[in-house]
Image (tube, helix red, strand yellow):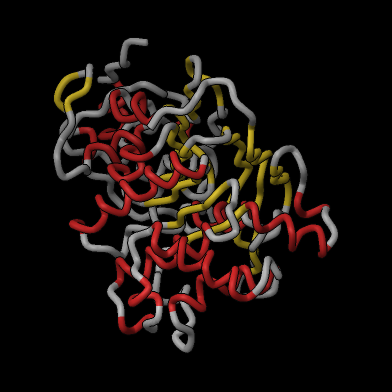
Amino acid sequence: MSGPASIETILTVDRLDVTFKGRRAHQKVRAVVDVSFAVRQGETFGVIGESGSGKSTIGRTIVCLERPSAGRILHFGKDPFQMSSRELRRHRRSFQIVFQDPNAALDPRMTILDSVREPLDVAGIGRPSERRMKALAMLDRVALSEELALRYPHEISGGQKQRANIARALVLHPDLIVCDEVVAALDVSIQADMLNLFADLQREFGLTYVFISHDLRVVAHISDRVAVMYAGKLVELASAEMLMDRPLHPYTQALLSAEPEPRVSEAGDRRRVVLKGEIPSPLSPPPGCRFHTRCPIAQPECAFREPEWREFEPGRFVACHYAGTRLSASEGSARDGSDLDSAAAGHDPVTR
């Protein structure tokens, strides 16, 4: 999908920080650190990263389920956290979220129809009979019949439950929907149908999506632009096509190389790059570049100097001292000491 180049900005994330209290009184977990991006109306903005990278926290903050510790979220230029409780309740209709687990999002004591109608009931929109008809119409739009609508969640499949959650999010006709790992719990055979449904709904209702996933293949398929997160920070942002053809950050390159079907880019065949170690704990992130403890081309300066978030070329942003260095399979195994130095010495910068 490709959106227009010059259209209204629906969402602005400006130097966002989200911090949680740890288990101990003095502990603080910085789940999101100094993240900035903007989403244009009508586009699909993908956010990719490992578990614990902070991507879901961003999604929850966008729809006001979490409060920023610093920075701000703007919806059409307005800060929802500066609104009164009454204003925020009404405003929230425009920004909805679909969660990963379709079972947890539906009340087991309510029929599917009642669950989809509930947002209309809470908002007090129309008469009861009108709310019922609107809910049925939206369920029909996501390919759920009236017979299925009268069933309870345990009586339908996982894919049908997720369709019900999509209908529930759409019934208030929002401007933006955050999709948080919405196909992760579904069979691969169902994922393609669900992604096609999202594309159809976007065209029909003029929706804007923030599409969050750990699966780069899924995000790149549906997104116009993709932001890559690691340990609470953005490391790369580019159009989906650019990111898949020529990733600049070594973490993005490693993610892309892990695809089941290797892609061929302008740089040639991309081999598997295996990262060692685990994503660092948000309780004690490493100094300097947060990726340097796993990066196959890390240099001494990476351990103490944090890379600047910069526009590498028009429309492409990256946070890496050695952005554009192409990794090889052998470099993917390098971990420390002379191995890292020798790997870095053989840098093969991608032609800009």
Quadrant occupied by the C terminus: top left
Tell me which residue sits at (43%, 42%) in the image.
Answer: 291
* Residue 333, quarter of the rendered image: top left
- Measured as percent of width and height from the top left, residue 294 is found at 35, 44
- Measured as percent of width and height from the top left, residue 151 is found at 37, 82
Please tell me how many numbered marks the rendered image carries: 0
Res 290 visible: yes
Tell me which residue sits at (47%, 89%) in the image.
Answer: 109
Closer to us: 335 or 8: 8
* Residue 9, quarter of the rendered image: top right
Q: Residue furthest bottom?
A: 109
Q: Residue furthest top?
A: 351
Q: Residue furthest right?
A: 84
Res 99 visible: no
Left or right: 255 as drawn, with respect to 66: left
Tell me which residue sits at (22%, 22%) in the image.
Answer: 265
Closer to us: 187 or 250: 187
- Measured as percent of width and height from the top left, residue 281 is found at 48, 59
Quadrant occupied by the N terminus: top left
* In the rendered image, the vertical position of residue 15 relative to residue 350, given as above or below: below
Tell me which residue sits at (38%, 80%) in the image.
Answer: 153
* Residue 183, quarter of the rendered image: bottom left
